[in-house]
Image (spheres, grey):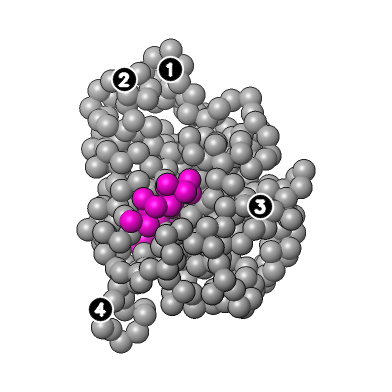
């Protein structure tokens, strides 16, 4: 039996799911963001300015979809020399509807960038709270956000100085970033280790590559933080509900360069077709892995990798090109592909 991990025969839309504009601390207006990303092949941007939800659906048209979202920060409260010494947890919340502007666990004291002066007039769920650090409060945010049908992503855990005991207790996450352009530009490496650590606990969540763009440097500058990380969403059409549903079910892959054209499991064999690559890897919850390497002067555009019996719990695929850029599939657990 064939199990498609990306829906074949539907549209593939390029999306940035982490974006900042002049509505908080970004340098480009929402309209400028739309123009910039559309000019480089994107169809979707989730506008996730800090702490404040805003409806950008006026930007949506036949060729572009604006997703409603925002980024919440919960900072460690221990004394330190500066914010740079403290751990923090940043969560992106993406709304299931463009008009869902009800803030979860809202604390106006956490709003540090409010150019429109709206922080005392926003809609909330459950009223105003005083945010606390630690997993109990973070899980409250995730739980209440889920009740309001937000998808909740854990952002840039490496930049956040997070250790495993900070993110492993989190329950109900939709996904975690494995690549963040802004953080990479600042010198923080991308890493899939937090994703694997959560998966090894049996948590069925997705992985994302994003920009987290603030656009302090212009396009063409080596520190420009747009266009470096994205997801490719497989959806029936470019409209809010089908795209949100595709995200929720994991019908997408993340990338900082390569394309994954098709991905499926059939009769215990993983099949991958992709843009030219030097390496295709399948990893699992333990040491068992499978890899295909291109020969000198050659490239891989497809691979068939038998799934070993000792590939426990889940598998996920990484495609790496000659420049070192990667694409990451979402993890799929064995029971989802008929392996028990």
Q: In this image, 104 relative to 29: left or right?
A: left
Drawn side of residue 219 relative to residue 195, left or right:
right
Question: Which sits earlier in the primary sequence, circle 4 or circle 1?
Answer: 4
Instruction: In the rendered structure, find residue 266 and report the number of the disc placed on it.
Output: 1
Residue range of the region highlighted in magenta in the rendering: 140-159
Q: Is residue 288 above or below residue 125?
A: above
Q: Tell whether position 94 is magenta.
A: no
> Residue tagged by mark 3?
66
Which label is found at residue 78? 4
Front tag of 4 and 1: 4
Q: Nearer the viewer, mark 2 or mark 4?
A: 4
Q: Position of residue 16 (x, y in %)?
A: 58, 53
The picture quadrant where one finds residue 330 is: top left
Q: CA distance from mark 2 to mark 4?
A: 47 Å
- Quadrant of the rendering where the N terminus is positioned: top left
Residue at x 72%, y 50% (from the top left corner): 60
Q: Earlier in the sequence, mark 1 or mark 3?
A: 3
Q: Residue at x 43, y 17 (%)?
A: 266
* Cα distance between the residues tagged 3 and 4: 37 Å
Contact check, label 3 and label 2, Cβ < 8 Å:
no
Badge 2 is on which residue? 339
Give the Cα separation between the discs numbered 1 and 3: 36 Å
**Residue name at image x 28 percent, y 84 percent:** 80
Residue 167 point in image, percent of width and height: 29, 56
Q: SS for tag 2?
A: loop
Q: Residue furthest bottom?
A: 81
Q: Secondary structure at mark 4?
A: loop
Q: Gap in Å between the C-alphas at discs 1 and 2?
A: 11 Å
> In the image, is residue 155 part of the stretch drawn in magenta?
yes
Which disc is residue 76 wearing? none
Of the two numbered discs 1 and 3 in the rendering, the one whose residue sits closer to the viewer: 3
Observer-nearest of 61 and 16: 61
């Amino acid at each position: 039996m064939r199990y498609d991990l990306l829906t074949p025969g539907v549209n593939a839309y390029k999306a940035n799911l982490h974006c900042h504009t002049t509505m908080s601390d970004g340098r480009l207006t929402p309209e400028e963001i739309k123009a910039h990303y559309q000019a480089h092949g994107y169809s979707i941007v989730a506008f996730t300015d800090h702490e404040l939800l805003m409806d950008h659906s006026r930007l949506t048209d036949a060729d572009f979809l604006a997703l409603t979202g925002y980024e919440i920060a919960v900072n460690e409260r221990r004394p330190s020399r500066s914010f740079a010494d403290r751990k923090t947890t940043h969560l992106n919340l993406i709304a299931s509807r463009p008009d869902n502007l009800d803030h979860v666990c809202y604390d106006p004291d956490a709003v540090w960038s409010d150019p429109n002066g709206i922080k005392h007039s926003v809609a909330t769920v459950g009223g105003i709270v005083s945010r606390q650090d630690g997993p109990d409060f973070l899980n409250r945010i995730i739980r209440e956000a889920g009740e309001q049908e937000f998808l909740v992503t854990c952002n840039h855990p490496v930049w956040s100085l997070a250790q495993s005991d900070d993110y492993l207790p989190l329950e109900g996450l939709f996904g975690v970033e494995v690549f963040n352009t802004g953080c990479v530009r600042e010198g923080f490496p991308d890493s899939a280790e937090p994703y694997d650590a959560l998966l090894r606990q049996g948590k069925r969540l997705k992985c994302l590559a994003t920009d987290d763009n603030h656009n302090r440097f212009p396009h063409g500058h080596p520190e420009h933080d747009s266009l470096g990380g994205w997801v490719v969403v497989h959806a029936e059409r470019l409209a809010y509900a089908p795209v949100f549903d595709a995200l929720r079910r994991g019908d997408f892959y993340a990338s900082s360069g390569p394309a994954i054209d098709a991905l499926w499991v059939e009769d215990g064999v993983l099949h991958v077709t992709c843009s030219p690559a030097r390496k295709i890897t399948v990893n699992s919850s333990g040491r068992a892995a499978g890899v295909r390497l291109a020969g000198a002067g050659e490239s891989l555009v497809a691979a068939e990798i038998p799934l070993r019996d000792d590939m426990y719990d889940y598998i996920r695929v990484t495609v790496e090109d000659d420049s070192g850029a990667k694409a990451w599939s979402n993890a799929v657990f064995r029971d989802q592909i008929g392996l028990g």
